[in-house]
Amino acid sequence: MVATTQDSQWPSAATLLHPQLVPGRKNVALVGVSTYKTSLSPRSSSSTPRAIRRALRRYSTWSFLDQFDLAEFVALVDYGDVKDPDGKKGAERVAAVLAKVADDVPLTVVLGGDNAATWHALRALADGHYEEYGLITLDAHLDSREGRSNGSPVRQLLDEGLDAHHVVQVGLGEFTNAPAYARAALGAGVTVIERNVFRREDVASIARRALAIAGEGGRKIYVDIDLDVADRSVVPGCPAAAPGGLSADEVRRFVREVATSRQVVAIDFTEIDVERDSADERTVRLAALLVLDALAGVQRRSKWPSL
């Protein structure tokens, strides 16, 4: 049973949220980019970032896997939500909020919104210097459609100068992507690690391979976690999720592994519609756990300084 009463011996993970930098801790930035207006699937305007923050109350700060208390080492500095990122000058508002993040923050966590949030956030962070960045997506889809929508962020970033040879797309589903877009991505030099690889290769080794390609030459790495990569049974709040996706555990292990790399400077969690979630909020609860896994990855950097 989830602790719901006040108990000084059971600190909620929501206590990791702070309005400003906390001295003596690794400060991880949190920004909400609740995009939804250009979604290819009908989607509500309900705030997923707000729901994920609430869901943090359901978890504690202790990691049995790594044997540490996040509250002793990490703070989640909340920079709030960008107002109407889909609207006129929305990209400028996203850039303005991300510009407030302190330079020495080891990781920025972006809460979507749909996958349009990925284009907004990486574009703002790169500020035209795409040669400094690589991209890893954990996603069922290539996100290379024409136009501007939640189905196009990778193509938009490539069009703007992101080098395809430092883009790694992991977890792509069967019968989920158009032939023309698949061939275009492969032809451009994008590395594709399709979903079936998870059936024969360890999650950690897949993550490390993706990190090596995206971060070759010392590039900073942006990671996009689109929750529709998971099996529909565990993410009913993801409109495009399908049967046969990754397990919740596989997604969590991937997130903790990539967040351990010092080259990963930002990670987003996208494609959740809280209005479509199940009554037990399993999709939002998984997203909250993924935030904690990302924080655990940052703390792991102290244990493995070479990563």
Image: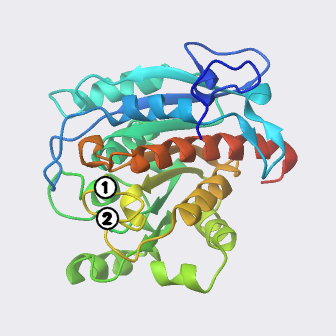
Where 64 falls versus 95 (above or below)?
below
Q: Give me the disc on residue 241.
A: 2
Q: Is 132 on the left or on the right of 139, as rendered?
A: right
Amino acid under disc 2? Ala
Residue 101 shows in the view: no
Residue 173: quarter of image: bottom left
Q: Disc 2 on helix, strand or loop?
A: loop
Q: In which quarter of the image is the N terminus?
A: top right
Q: Residue at x 30, y 54 (%)?
A: 153
Q: Quadrant of the C terminus?
A: bottom right
Q: How far apart are marks 1 and 2 (CA)?
A: 6 Å
Residue 11, given in percent of the width and then of the height, sits at: 69, 25
Q: Residue at x 60, y 22 (%)?
A: 5
12 or 152: which is nearer to us? 12
Amino acid under disc 1? Cys
Residue 48, given in percent of the width and then of the height, sits at: 34, 36
Q: Is 149 on the left or on the right of 91, as rendered?
A: left
Q: Is 294 on the left or on the right of 302, as rendered?
A: left
Residue 182: quarter of image: bottom left
Residue 92, given in percent of the width and then of the height, sits at: 29, 26
**Contact check, label 1 and label 2, Cβ < 8 Å:** yes
- Residue at which label 1 appears: 238
Residue 168 shows in the view: yes
Count how many numbered circles sit on residues in the image: 2
Q: Disc 1 on helix, strand or loop?
A: loop
Classify 10 Å Cα crowding around label 2: few (below 14), some (14-19), many (20 and above). Answer: many
